[in-house]
Image (spheres, rainbow, N blue to C red):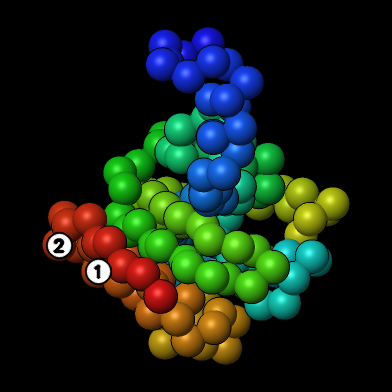
């Protein structure tokens, strides 16, 4: 256990009062035309990037590319961090921090193998049509992540 001035039972009780935050991560994967890989989940409305919830004891980048492999069957070289989004008071999802990483460019003939338990479909999306698939805030975040690719910056935003 952690060194503490408190007895272990009091320390555990104190820790239980601290806020928790869910971590998730997605990969901005592109094809040769610069389109973004979008996924249609079966458990919520709207679309998402390949990626998902970061598990306990797992770093966000590791979790992101593990989820990419599970969801679409792509084993990619983990790319750099592009954007961090702090989603505060997100309804039933609670507070969360979402990381977007560079998933690189995949070959146009690269097969996509969907995880059928969670996903209904995928599409390669142009930047101009993101609002047709994502909420306005999500579309903005994806455009910001795309801009971070070109600028070399890491962008940090909150809702």
Asked if marks 2 and 1 touch (Cβ < 8 Å), the reply is yes
| 123 over 139 or under it: above or below | above
Q: Which residue is mark 2?
A: 151
Which residue is nearer to you in this view: 20 or 55?
Answer: 20
Is residue 74 toward the left or the right of residue 98 in the image? right
**Is residue 146 something that shows in the picture?**
no
Dot 1: element? helix
Is residue 117 toward the left or the right of residue 84 in the image? right
The local crowd at label 1, few if under 14, some if 14 to 19, many if 20 or more residues have their Cα within 10 Å, is some
Q: CA distance from mark 2 to mark 1?
A: 6 Å
| 134 over 146 or under it: above or below | below
Numbered label tally: 2
Quadrant hosting residue 134: bottom right
Which residue is nearer to you in this view: 135 or 37?
Answer: 135
**Quarter occupied by the C terminus:** bottom left
What label sits on residue 147 in the rendered view? Answer: 1
Residue 21 position within the rendered picture, expressed as x and y whole percent measured from the top left: 53, 50
Looking at the image, which residue is at 74% across and 52% down? 114
Looking at the image, which residue is at 83% across and 53% down? 116
Residue 154 position within the rendered picture, expressed as x and y whole percent measured from the top left: 22, 55
Looking at the image, which residue is at 54% across and 83% down? 135
Dot 2: element? helix
**Is residue 96 something that shows in the picture?**
yes
């Amino acid at each position: 256990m952690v060194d503490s001035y408190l007895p272990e039972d009091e320390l555990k009780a104190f820790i239980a009062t601290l806020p928790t935050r869910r971590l998730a991560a997605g990969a901005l994967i592109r094809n040769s035309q610069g389109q973004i890989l979008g996924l249609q989940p079966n458990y919520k409305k709207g679309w998402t990037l390949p990626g998902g919830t970061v598990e306990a004891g797992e770093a966000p980048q590791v979790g992101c590319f593990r989820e990419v492999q599970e969801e679409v069957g792509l084993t990619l070289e983990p790319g750099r961090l592009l954007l961090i989004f702090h989603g505060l008071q997100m309804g039933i999802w609670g507070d969360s921090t979402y990381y977007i990483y560079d998933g690189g460019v995949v070959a146009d003939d690269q097969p996509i193998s969907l995880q059928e338990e969670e996903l209904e479909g995928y599409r390669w999306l142009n930047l101009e049509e993101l609002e047709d698939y994502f909420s306005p805030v999500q579309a903005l975040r994806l455009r910001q992540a795309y801009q971070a690719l070109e600028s070399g910056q890491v962008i940090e935003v909150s809702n």
